[in-house]
C-alpha cells in the first residue's frame, strides 16, 4: 500500500465562544492565536494557534445549521477533527474510497487557511472525523 498522507496538519477543536476560547488557549499555550478566519460556506469562524511545529484550529459555529453547532449540541465542546496534510488530495480520495472509507465530500471544498479539504465520515474511521488537506495554491 502506498501511503501518501503526511504529517498532522492541525487538530480542530469545537468551541461555543471563540473569543472566550482564544483567551483560554492563550493561557494554555502562552501566546495568542495568529489569525481568525470565517468560512461562510461552512458556517464556521476559526482561529489558529501555532504551538511549536503544530497547529490548533478552534471552530465556532456561526449559525444553527453549522456542523460545529450540531456537533456541540450532540457531544459538547472538544476535539472535532484531525487534519492530515496530503500532497494530492484527489488521488488520496480515490485511494481511500477504494479501501472502503466513506468520503463526505468527494469534491474538495475550500477550507480555512487556504486549503482544499475533504472529510472522511467518522462512521468508517472509528468515530474520528478525519480531514485531508492540501495547500490551495
Ligand atoms: Zn480543520
Image: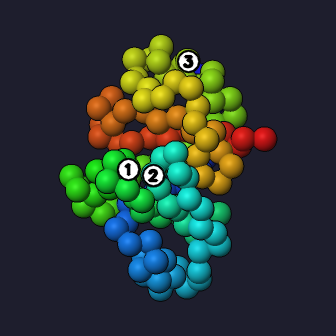
Could one spot residue 55 in this view of the protein? no
Could one spot residue 69 in this view of the protein? yes
Q: Which residue is mark 2?
A: 43
Q: Secondary structure at mark 2?
A: loop
Q: Which residue is mark 1?
A: 66
Q: Which residue is mark 3?
A: 94
Residue at x-position 63% and y-position 30%: 89
Q: Position of residue 63 (x, y in %)?
A: 37, 56
**117 is higher (above) or lower (below) than 22:** above
Q: Earlier in the sequence, mark 1 or mark 3?
A: 1
**109 is higher (above) or lower (below) than 102:** below
Residue at mark 1: C-beta within 8 A of ligand 1: no
Q: Quadrant of the N terminus?
A: top right
- As drawn, which residue projects farthest toward the left? 74
- As drawn, which residue projects farthest toward the top? 98
Residue at mark 3: C-beta within 8 A of ligand 1: no
Q: Are marks 2 and 1 in contact (CB under 8 Å)?
A: yes
Q: CA distance from mark 2 to mark 1?
A: 5 Å
Amino acid at each position: 500500500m502506498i501511503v501518501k498522507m503526511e504529517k498532522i496538519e492541525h487538530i480542530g477543536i469545537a468551541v461555543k465562544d471563540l473569543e472566550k476560547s482564544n483567551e483560554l488557549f492563550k493561557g494554555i499555550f502562552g501566546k495568542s492565536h495568529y489569525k481568525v478566519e470565517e468560512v461562510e460556506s461552512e458556517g464556521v469562524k476559526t482561529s489558529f494557534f501555532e504551538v511549536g511545529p503544530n497547529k490548533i484550529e478552534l471552530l465556532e459555529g456561526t449559525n444553527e445549521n453549522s456542523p460545529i453547532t450540531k456537533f456541540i449540541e450532540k457531544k459538547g465542546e472538544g476535539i472535532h477533527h484531525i487534519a492530515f496534510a496530503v500532497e494530492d488530495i484527489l488521488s488520496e480520495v480515490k485511494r481511500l474510497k477504494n479501501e472502503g472509507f466513506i468520503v463526505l465530500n468527494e469534491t474538495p471544498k475550500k477550507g480555512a487557511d487556504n486549503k482544499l479539504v475533504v472529510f472522511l465520515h467518522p462512521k468508517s474511521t472509528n468515530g474520528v472525523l478525519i480531514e485531508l488537506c492540501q495547500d490551495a495554491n
